[in-house]
C-alpha cells in the first residue's frame, strides 16, 4: 500500500490534503473506538507541509503518508494520555525521538490510538476511554495493548501505525485484527519519549511486511537520548524481500501447537509451516521446555517495573491531582492514584510492590530475573541451530468482549506465544495465515536472531504473496 | 507493621491493606475485596517461580550501554515549560507579563 500511495502522491493523482481528509472522514464514521485523540487541525497543517515537499520533488518514503501511533508515545503538539485518567489532560513538553523522525519526513499524524492503560493488558478493555472493537466482529476485542493501532490499520483508518510491544502488545493485536506487525530487535528503535517499561520496543503495524519495512526504515537508529538503543547502520528492512528461502531451517515450537491451542489456530499455523516446506525450507519440530516458566517470570518483572515506574504519578510530580478539602499530602497522593489509575494498573502496582518487598525480593524478583536470563539462553541455543522459530502469535483468536473478565490469570497466560521474544530481546513478526470458523483472523509468528529483522520481513512477505486476506466486515 | 509480618499471621485482606499503603494507593472496601479475589487467581501463577532453584542460573546480563555523551551542561527545557506541567502553578499573567512564581504548592507535609 505505501508504495502505491507514494506513487499516487508523487504523480499528483491525489493531494496529501485529499488523502488526509479521506482518512479523517473514515475515522469520524467508525465506531471501533480505535482513536483516543484525532488530530484534525494538526494533520491538515502537516498535509500542507508535506504537499510542499512533494511539489518540490523532494519526497521521502513517508512524506504525506497519513499514519497513527499509540497514545503512549509522547507528542508535544497533542495530548498523550497512555489511555489513563491519570494523564487525561497531559500534553508532553517534548516529542519522542521516533515522532521527530517521522516529522522529519513530513508524515501526517492522524491521531493517537487507543491502548490498554499504560500498555498493561492484552485487550484494550482497561483503557479509560473504553475498549477498541475488533474490525472483524465488534463483539470481540482488538487485542492489546496496541489494539487501537492494529484496529485502525485493519479498518483502513490510517495507512500504517506505530505500536509498542512489551510482551506481545503489538504482535497479538496485529494477529487478532488480521494485519502484519513487527516487534524489532531490542535497541533498533529508540525508546526515548515512550511511556513504557524496559521490555518495550516500538514497531510498525501495517497491511504488509513490505510496509512494515518501510516504516521501520524511518523509525530505526541509535539515539544518544536512549542508552539502550543500538548505534548501527541498517540496510533497508525491505532489502531481503523476494530472496529465496530455500535452504533455511525453521523450528516449529511443539509446546505452542499442542492441546492448549485452539484447533483452528493449530491447523492454520501448521498449514503455514507446510507452505515454507514447499518452498525449500526445512521445518522441524523443536522443544522449548522453559516455556512453562516464561509467563510467571515475565509477569513478575513487568509488575515490578510497573510499580516502580508509575510511582512518580502521584498528583504532585506528575499526573492529575484529585484532592478534597482537608487532604494532607499523603491523602492527596493516595486519592490521586486511586482515582487516576484503573483496576488492571492497580493490580500490577500491588503485585509489583509485593515482589519487591524486603523478604520477597529474592523469592520472586531475583529468581524471575535469573530465570529470564536462562530462558534467553535456551532461545538463543535454538536459534543457533535454526534460522527462525515458527509458532502461532496467540493460542486463540480474539477473545469475546466479556471473556476472562473475572479470570485475570487466564488473560496473562494467553501471552505464552509472544513473551519469549520479548524476554530474549529478539525480533518477531506476525502475519495472518487464516481465519477461524467465526471469521476471526489467525496469526502466524516468526521469531529470528538479533538484527535479523529484514530476514523476518522477507519470510513473512513470501507467505503474504500467496495468502488472500479478507477485509474486515466480509461475511464468512 | 513490617514487611515480614505480611505472611506471619495476617489475613490476605490485612496484607493487601499493607501493600496498598506501601504503594500509596487509597483503595476503598469494595476495591479491596475485588483485589483480594484477583490476587487469589494470580498468585498461583507467580508462585511457579518459587520452587525453582535459581543458583545454577546465569546472572542477568549487564545492560550494554550505548555511547555516553560527555558530562557537560547543556541547554534544557525552560523553567516555564516545566512549571506549566504542574496542576497547581500560579504562572504568568495571561498577557505574558508578571513575575511567575518559581514554586508550586502542595498541601502541608508536617
Image (cartoon, coloured by chain):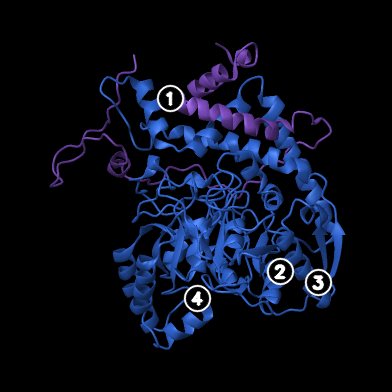
Chain colours: A blue, B purple
Q: Earlier in the sequence, mark 3 or mark 4?
A: 4
Do pointers 1 and 3 mark residues of a single chain? no
- Chain letter of the residue carrying label 2: A
Q: Badge 4 local density, few (<14 within 10 Å), some, or many (20+)? A: some
Q: SS at mark 3?
A: helix
Do pointers 4 and 1 mark residues of a single chain? no
Q: Earlier in the sequence, mark 3 or mark 2?
A: 3
Q: SS at mark 2?
A: helix
Residue B50 rendering spot, x and y as whole percentages: 75, 28
What's the distance in space between the residues labelled 3 and 4, CA to CA? Answer: 35 Å
Q: Which residue is mark 1?
A: B28
Q: Which residue is mark 2?
A: A455
Q: Earlier in the sequence, mark 2 or mark 4?
A: 4
> Which quarter of the figure is the C terminus of chain A placed in?
bottom right
Q: Is residue A241 above or below residue A319?
A: below
Do pointers 1 and 2 mark residues of a single chain? no
Residue A230 rendering spot, x and y as whole percentages: 62, 55
What's the distance in space between the residues labelled 1 and 2, CA to CA? Answer: 52 Å
Labelled pair 1, 3 in contact (Cβ < 8 Å) = no
What's the distance in space between the residues labelled 4 and 1, CA to CA? Answer: 52 Å
> Given this view, does label 1 or label 2 mark the residue nearer the observer?
1
Q: Which mark is residue A274?
A: 3
Residue A281 rendering spot, x and y as whole percentages: 83, 72
Amino acid at each position: 500500500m505505501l508504495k502505491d500511495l507514494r506513487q499516487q502522491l508523487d504523480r499528483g493523482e491525489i493531494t496529501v490534503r485529499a488523502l488526509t481528509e479521506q482518512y479523517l472522514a473514515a475515522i469520524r464514521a467508525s465506531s471501533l473506538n480505535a482513536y483516543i485523540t484525532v488530530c484534525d487541525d494538526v494533520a491538515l497543517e502537516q498535509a500542507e507541509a508535506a504537499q510542499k515537499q512533494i511539489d518540490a520533488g523532494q519526497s521521502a518514503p513517508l512524506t504525506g503518508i497519513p499514519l497513527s501511533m499509540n497514545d503512549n508515545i509522547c507528542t508535544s503538539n497533542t495530548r498523550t494520555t497512555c489511555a489513563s485518567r491519570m494523564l487525561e489532560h497531559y500534553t508532553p513538553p517534548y516529542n519522542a525521538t521516533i515522532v521527530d523522525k517521522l516529522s522529519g519526513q513530513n508524515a501526517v499524524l492522524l491521531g493517537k490510538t487507543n491502548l490498554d492503560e499504560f500498555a498493561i493488558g492484552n485487550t484494550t478493555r482497561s483503557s479509560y476511554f473504553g475498549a477498541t472493537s475488533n474490525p472483524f466482529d465488534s463483539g470481540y476485542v482488538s487485542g492489546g495493548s496496541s489494539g487501537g493501532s492494529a484496529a485502525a490499520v485493519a479498518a483502513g483508518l490510517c495507512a500504517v501505525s506505530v505500536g509498542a510491544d512489551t510482551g506481545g502488545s503489538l504482535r497479538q493485536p496485529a494477529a487478532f485484527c488480521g494485519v502484519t506487525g513487527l516487534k524489532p530487535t531490542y535497541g533498533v528503535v529508540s525508546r526515548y519519549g515512550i511511556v513504557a517499561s524496559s521490555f518495550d520496543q516500538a514497531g510498525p503495524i501495517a497491511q504488509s511486511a513490505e510496509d512494515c519495512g518501510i516504516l521501520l526504515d524511518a523509525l530505526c537508529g541509535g539515539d544518544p537520548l536512549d542508552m539502550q538503543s543500538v548505534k548501527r547502520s541498517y540496510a533497508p528492512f525491505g532489502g531481503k524481500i523476494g530472496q529465496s528461502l530455500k535452504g533455511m531451517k525453521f523450528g516449529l515450537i511443539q509446546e505452542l501447537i499442542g492441546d492448549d491451542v485452539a484447533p483452528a489456530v493449530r491447523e492454520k499455523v501448521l498449514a503455514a509451516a507446510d507452505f515454507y516446506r514447499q518452498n525449500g525450507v526445512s521445518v522441524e519440530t523443536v522443544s522449548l521446555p522453559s516455556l512453562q516458566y516464561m509467563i510467571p517470570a515475565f509477569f513478575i518483572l513487568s509488575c515490578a517495573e510497573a510499580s516502580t515506574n508509575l510511582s512518580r504519578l502521584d498528583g504532585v510530580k506528575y499526573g492529575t491531582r484529585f484532592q478534597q478539602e482537608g487532604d494532607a499530602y499523603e491523602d492527596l497522593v493516595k486519592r490521586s492514584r486511586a482515582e487516576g489509575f484503573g483496576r488492571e494498573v492497580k493490580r500490577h502496582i500491588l503485585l509489583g510492590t509485593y515482589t519487591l518487598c524486603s523478604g520477597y525480593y529474592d523469592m520472586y524478583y531475583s529468581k524471575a530475573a535469573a530465570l529470564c536470563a536462562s530462558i534467553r539462553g535456551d532461545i538463543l541455543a535454538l536459534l543457533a541451530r535454526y534460522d527462525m522459530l515458527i509458532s502461532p502469535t496467540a493460542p486463540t483468536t480474539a477473545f469475546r468482549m466479556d471473556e476472562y473478565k473475572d479470570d485475570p490469570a487466564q488473560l496473562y497466560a494467553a501471552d505464552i506465544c509472544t513473551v519469549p521474544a520479548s524476554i530474549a530481546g529478539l525480533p518477531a513478526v506476525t502475519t495472518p495465515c487464516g481465519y477461524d470458523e467465526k471469521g476471526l483472523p489467525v496469526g502466524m509468528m516468526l521469531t529470528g536472531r538479533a538484527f535479523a529483522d529484514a530476514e523476518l520481513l522477507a519470510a513473512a512477505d513470501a507467505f503474504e504473496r500467496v495468502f488472500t486476506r479478507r477485509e474486515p466486515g466480509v461475511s464468512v | 507493621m513490617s514487611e515480614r509480618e505480611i505472611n506471619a499471621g495476617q489475613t490476605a485482606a490485612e496484607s493487601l491493606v499493607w501493600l496498598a499503603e506501601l504503594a500509596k494507593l487509597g483503595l476503598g472496601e469494595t476495591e479491596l475485596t475485588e483485589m483480594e479475589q484477583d490476587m487469589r487467581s494470580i498468585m498461583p501463577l507467580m508462585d511457579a517461580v518459587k520452587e525453582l532453584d535459581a543458583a545454577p542460573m546465569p546472572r542477568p546480563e549487564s545492560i550494554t550501554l550505548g555511547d555516553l555523551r560527555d558530562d557537560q551542561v547543556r541547554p534544557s527545557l525552560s523553567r516555564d515549560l516545566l512549571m506549566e506541567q504542574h496542576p497547581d502553578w500560579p504562572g504568568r499573567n495571561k498577557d505574558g507579563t508578571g513575575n511567575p512564581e518559581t514554586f508550586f504548592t502542595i498541601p502541608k507535609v508536617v
